[in-house]
Amino acid sequence: MAELSSIWIYGVLLVFSVLLHPGGSFYLPGSYPHKYSVGDLLSVKVNSLTSIETEMPFSYYSLPFCKPEDGVKDSAENLGELLMGDRIENSPYRFKMFTNESDILLCRTGPLNAEALSLLKKRIDEMYQVNLILDNLPAIRYTKKDEFMLRWTGYPVGIRVGDSYYLFNHLKFTVLVHKYEETNVARVMGTGDAVDVIPNLDKAGSGPPGYMVVGFEVVPCSFQHDAESVKNAKMYSQYPAKIQCDPTTVAMVVKENQPLVFTYEVSFVESDIKWPSRWDAYLKMEGAKVHWFSILNSLMVIAFLAGIVLVIFLRTVRRDLTRYEELDKEAQAQMNEELSGWKLVVGDVFRAPTNPSLLCIMVGDGVQILGMAVVTILFAALGFMSPASRGTLITGMLFFYLVLGIAAGYVAVRLWKTLRCGDHSGWVSVSWRVACFFPGIAFLILTTLNFLLWGSQSTGAIPIYLFIILLLLWFCISVPLTLIGGFFGARAAHIEYPVRTNQIPREIPPQKYPSWLLVLGAGTLPFGTLFIELFFIMSSLWMGRVYYVFGFLFIVLILLVIVCAEVSLVLTYMHLCVEDWRWWWKAFFSSGSVAIYIFLYSANYLVFDLKSLSGPVSATLYLGYSLLMVLAIMFATGTVGFMSSFWFVHYLFSSVKLD
């Protein structure tokens, strides 16, 4: 027995160590590093142009950049990448492993017309960034501010100085490589960093030396080229003059009817960085210590506050139960006549609420959303959905949401059957509405926003064929699974009420304060578990930062569920004590009202943190996505509050003899 206990404790500690250190060198099976021999061709890919000014991605080739000789080709993309607006394409930049090159001519474009010049200036004003990818690593740029070294992914298209616009047309690349280690590399596993299996060296170790890409840095420069000197030069030929890359000065002014010349240089540096740690430069940004300290501080405060609420609540209920059960039947009857409180609403506490079908639908959708969030964050915390695998997080969320339609249909129909005291008629209609209610709202919001993106010609717009795919997933997978869950819910036994409901509803005494005011204010406590973590989530969504502390996010989610349950229990008990037996919807919104504060926080973030967000389209996109997010949070947290209150009311009235 002691041995089993020690094994269990060891397992728990192992899981928590994994959850709390997701940014370290922990990798699960998924892919292996790619070994390159000296001289092997390395191809650089380009992603969408992005900016925190507009939050609308655009195609790299929408600007007058050099195109590959064999034409532009899309890379294989998953569903999540497309939904995120990523458009990964090939580029003309190419390197040879461990071969330094300098003054390489990329291309000379044609003269800029007025339309192309206007668009280029607009993108520079909107601070658009160029995103390059080598061996699945985004290009990273270092800038020094005061005594701190800042890291940025990508580089700006150009810069404006006064009335002049300068283009960054020369790139200085540094590729960090690590020598291939045969004995250890087979044990190094990641999630999406590469898709090719490593070729093994021969047993004697006499094979050619191999290297793995562990870093990709870029320094953009604005250099005034002589366009006439390269008029007839070919791509990848040597530029006729020496190029001095000085990132502190700018020289290439963009003008109408003037051609653009692009060049680059590349150097390879052998690094001590191991392949499993190559993403650390992207994940461990400045301020990580403050991030962790803030989250830990928030968790301790909320855990302490939740503990106090729970202790007070349990003591109050236990005192009432003990006092009531010590009385005999005659005294109980007399007390029922003389005293007010939850004992007096015994004949009305399980009276069906108004709009019972809507309550069942929202609870069913909440179960589906909450289950999706828990499973997705858990998988991400374990390393299955690392930033190395673009779009996996969105794809995983979509997959889990579809599958959990079974749980949504089951819970909604069983609750519907319980509210109707065992009558399951109409369960098909309830299942259909569960399958269509929240997805329909999401589809309406996303379609409206998509029209805005289409009108702006952004790569964030969902293509028509992807719309068709999403509709097929919805009606061919989600709806049937929800109906199957509803079928099992209709066959399952309904929950028996411990007391009978009177035919005539009891009159509710007038209250000093509106009960809904207390319900809306109750959302402040669950919001307290989120607001610090919410800042980092918002920053990763809208400021282009990488979010990686899924272990802490999972713990915050668990604490949020606990606090939502406690808040709903306390408010339900308070309403019953003042003889207000209409607790159903109030239990749902007492915890679901956290969504109101999250939306207000989102508006505050828009005004004070996204000051540079330009244009009504960008603001509409931000508010639309925020509205979709808070609706999902309201359904999930409201479901937690309702189900915990339902269990509490059922337990409370079944624990006392009220006959």
Image (cartoon, helix red, strand yellow):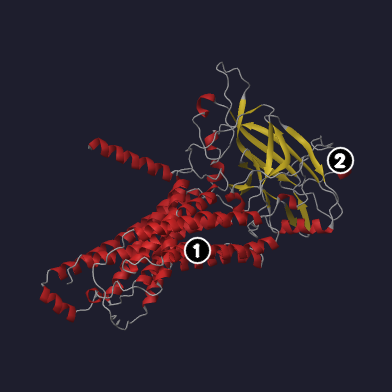
Question: Which residue bears the numbered disc 1?
Answer: 438
Which residue type carries mark 2?
Val
Above or below, 177 against 619 in this view is above
Location of the C terminus (image quadrant): bottom left
In front of the other: 110 or 129: 110
Question: Which residue bears the numbered disc 2?
Answer: 230
* Residue 473 drawn at (x, y percent): 55, 54
The image quadrant that residue 99 belongs to is: top right
- Mark 1 packing: few (<14 Cα in 10 Å), some, or many (20+)? many
Q: Residue at x 46, y 61 (%)?
A: 531
Earlier sequence position, callout 1 versus callout 2: 2
Left or right, residue 444 beside residue 514? right
- Whether residue 620 is visible here, answered yes or no, is yes
Between label 1 and label 2, give the one nearer the viewer.
1
Left or right, residue 274 beside residue 223? left
* Residue 498 drawn at (x, y percent): 24, 67
The image quadrant that residue 333 belongs to is: bottom left
- Mark 2 packing: few (<14 Cα in 10 Å), some, or many (20+)? some
Q: Secondary structure at mark 1?
A: helix
The numbered mark at residue 647 is none
Left or right, residue 537 beside residue 41? left
Above or below, 313 against 334 in this view is above
Which residue type carries mark 1?
Phe
> From this viewpoint, which residue is outermost toward the top?
204
* Residue 94 drawn at (x, y percent): 72, 36
Location of the N terminus (image quadrant): top left
Q: Secondary structure at mark 2?
A: helix
- Whether residue 611 is visible here, answered yes or no, is no
